[in-house]
């Protein structure tokens, strides 16, 4: 059984901005995503501080290197006591297996590990012409998702609109973590293929990753609560 949740993409440039944002939340402790910008600027201390405050953390660093290097890097990340992290499925099944090994702590516990299939910024045309992948983008996503499952990982990052296809190929228990979520009455900004929290749930998303609809809202706490209510429906938190 998975714990469905809303993950806030904390795409801030500094620890100060991030902590000021999290200070707005007096009652709930949202699951937060830390990306490359914040991690490269502030490093491990910001991860430890957010964890100390009681938040779950998805560290979105999308590792992709030779298996041994990824394994060692993952061992370092797992000591940060994060809850979820990721790799590129393009690194191969072997790289993903090594990542999983590196992430597993001596006591057998580990953060969730998910894989990026094809970035949503990669068009089918570019994938075929520049990466020389002779397939449709959907076939590529399904193949990479199957590789991810074969390597023993927990799921993939994908568009909510791809979540059904991934579940059909890999099973209901295989996690889908989906950015590209907008309120029905909201601004899409630079996202193209978007859907609402309620629809993401219907399609099968386990975790939705929501940034600007919450971080740039006049009242971020109200926007977060609305997102949770729409995504989790009657289940509450
Ligand atoms: O502000 P917004 O809701 O668009 O933020 C979505 C977050 O999810 C950002 O951190 C973005 O980098 C990330 N993401 C995405 N699409 C992907 C993978 C990650 O939007 N395919």
Image (spheres, rainbow, N blue to C red):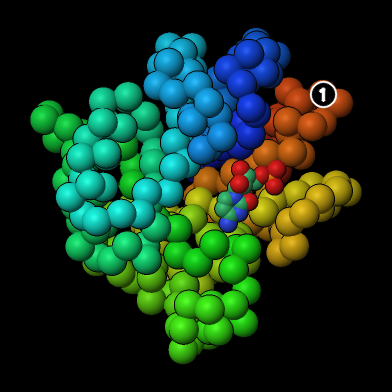
Up-down relation of residue 128 to residue 113 (above or below): below
Up-down relation of residue 134 to residue 197 (above or below): below
Check mark 1 vs ligand 1: CB closer than 8 Å? yes or no.
Answer: no
* Residue 89 drawn at (x, y percent): 37, 62
Q: For residue 209, what is the image quadrant?
A: top right
The total of numbered circles placed on residues is 1
Q: Which residue is mark 1?
A: 219
Q: Residue at x 12, y 29 (%)?
A: 107
Q: Residue at x 56, y 34 (%)?
A: 37
Q: Nearer the viewer, residue 79 or 196?
A: 79
Task: Residue 236: tell me if it is visible.
Answer: no
Q: Residue at x 68, y 39 (%)?
A: 211
Q: For residue 61, what is the image quadrant?
A: top left
Q: Is residue 129 left or right of residue 185?
A: left
Q: Residue at x 45, y 58 (%)?
A: 116
Farthest left residue in view? 106
Q: Residues within 10 Å of mark 1 (few under 14, many from 20)?
A: few
Task: Residue 10: tell me if it is visible.
Answer: yes
* Residue 33 drawn at (x, y percent): 53, 35
Please state, as top left, top right, bottom left or bottom right, where the C terminus lies in the image.
top right
Up-down relation of residue 162 to residue 207 (above or below): below
* Residue 166 drawn at (x, y percent): 46, 69
Q: Nearer the viewer, residue 2 or 146?
A: 146
* Residue 43 drawn at (x, y percent): 44, 23
The kind of secondary structure element at disc 1 is loop
Q: Is residue 72 left or right of residue 60?
A: left
Q: Nearer the viewer, residue 169 or 74?
A: 74
């Amino acid at each position: 059984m998975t714990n469905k949740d809303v993950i806030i993409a904390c795409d801030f440039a500094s620890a100060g901005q991030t902590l000021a944002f999290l200070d707005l939340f007096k009652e709930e402790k949202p699951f937060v995503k830390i990306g490359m910008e914040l991690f490269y600027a502030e490093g491990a201390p910001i991860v430890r501080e957010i964890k100390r405050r009681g938040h779950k953390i998805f560290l979105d660093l999308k590792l992709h290197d030779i298996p041994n290097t990824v394994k060692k890097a993952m061992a370092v990340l797992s000591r940060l006591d994060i809850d979820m992290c990721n790799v590129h499925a393009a690194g191969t099944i072997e790289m993903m297996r090594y990542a999983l090994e590196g992430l597993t702590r001596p006591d057998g516990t580990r953060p969730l590990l998910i894989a990026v299939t094809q970035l949503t910024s990669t068009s089918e045309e570019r994938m075929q012409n520049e990466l020389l992948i002779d397939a449709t983008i959907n076939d590529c996503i399904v193949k990479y998702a199957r590789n991810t499952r074969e390597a023993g990982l927990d799921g993939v990052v994908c568009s909510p609109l791809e979540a059904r296809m991934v579940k059909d190929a890999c099973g209901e228990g295989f996690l889908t973590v989906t950015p590209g979520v907008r309120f029905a009455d909201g601004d899409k900004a630079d996202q193209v293929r978007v859907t609402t929290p309620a629809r993401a749930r219907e399609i099968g998303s386990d975790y939705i990753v929501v940034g600007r609809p919450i971080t740039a809202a006049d009242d971020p706490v109200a926007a977060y609560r609305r997102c949770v209510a729409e995504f989790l429906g009657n289940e509450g938190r």
